[in-house]
Image: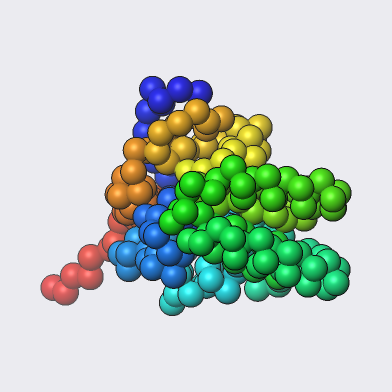
Amino acid sequence: MADTLTSPPVLSENVAYFFDLDGTLATIKPHPDEVVVPAEVLQALNQLAQLNEGALALISGRSMDELDKLAGPYRFPLAGVHGAERRDIHGHSQSISLPPDLIQTLHAQLTTALLYMPGTELEAKGMAFAIHYRQAQQYEQNIFALAEQIVHDNPQLSLQPGKCVVEIKPRGIHKGEAISTFMHEAPFLGRTPIFFGDDLTDEHGFDVVNQLKGVSVKVGAGETKASWRLATVPDVWQWVIKAANHQQEQQLAQINRRKPYGSLDRSF
């Protein structure tokens, strides 16, 4: 869809929220360690989670350990490394792993190759590898060629491009599958999904949400399968805070409508 998409609606009940992190809840920084989610946004996310029986999850290429640090002090359901690891509402975690000898071989191969591309950075995630080149974009073609060769030589792997990053991960793992898994279990089951993302890695998620007749939101410019758009990360922050306040007001209004008229005690 083109850049003419409008901003998403604010729904007031029976909603399941899914958020990417980098480029969606946090502005992208030169180094991943510099990323921060504002405290008032985290508070609004926690408010939305409480108002929806916990049906709010972070869906990211980052590891779950990183997501917990960025979301602290709150603890949400998570899908890390694009869904290769996942934690449900009860705190139960599961992950997909690669053979240790393959991980060791890939780590050595990638480390050696990147020595000849100064400014690039290898992020080892246990079951996946991310090659960052934001500070060395002149090597983009070389990095893609390297990643494509590794995936070609190892059919159990797949390549996932992103914004100035190429990831090598287990085949069949993506954010759409992670969202679908959440949507088949409580408290997400039976709710309308809303997913915010900004990158190519989020398009699988938009696909799934669209199939479920939910609200898919692209952050930033570019072609997308999403049905709605917000221009910038601060726009996402404003939307989250507005949605939390709106839903709380709606629930308080419903409670007040259900209250019986109080009786007056009179003394004569």
Q: Residue 205: percent from the left, percent from the top?
A: 61, 42
Residue 135 appears in which quarter of the rendering? bottom left
Q: Residue 30: percent from the left, percent from the top?
A: 39, 60
* Between 55 and 121, the one nearer to me in the picture: 121
Q: How many marks?
A: 0
Q: Write the residue at 67% across / 66% down.
A: 112
Q: Write the residue at 83% across / 66% down.
A: 102
Q: Is residue 127 above or below residue 83?
A: below
Q: Residue 162: percent from the left, percent from the top?
A: 55, 46
Quadrant of the image for the C terminus?
A: bottom left
Residue 208 in view, yes or no: yes
Horizontal arrangement in the rendering, residue 80 relative to residue 262 (left or right): right
Horizontal arrangement in the rendering, residue 259 relative to residue 20 (left or right): left
Q: Write the residue at 80% across / 68% down.
A: 105
Residue 190 in view, yes or no: no
Q: Write the residue at 73% across / 45% down.
A: 148
- Colour theme: rainbow
Residue 229 appears in which quarter of the rendering? top left
* Between 117 and 162, the one nearer to me in the picture: 117
Q: Is residue 224 above or below residue 187?
A: above
* Direction front: furthest residue: 116
Q: Residue 125: percent from the left, percent from the top?
A: 65, 68
* Between 142 and 225, the one nearer to me in the picture: 142
Horizontal arrangement in the rendering, residue 257 relative to residue 215 (left or right): left
* Direction left: furthest residue: 268
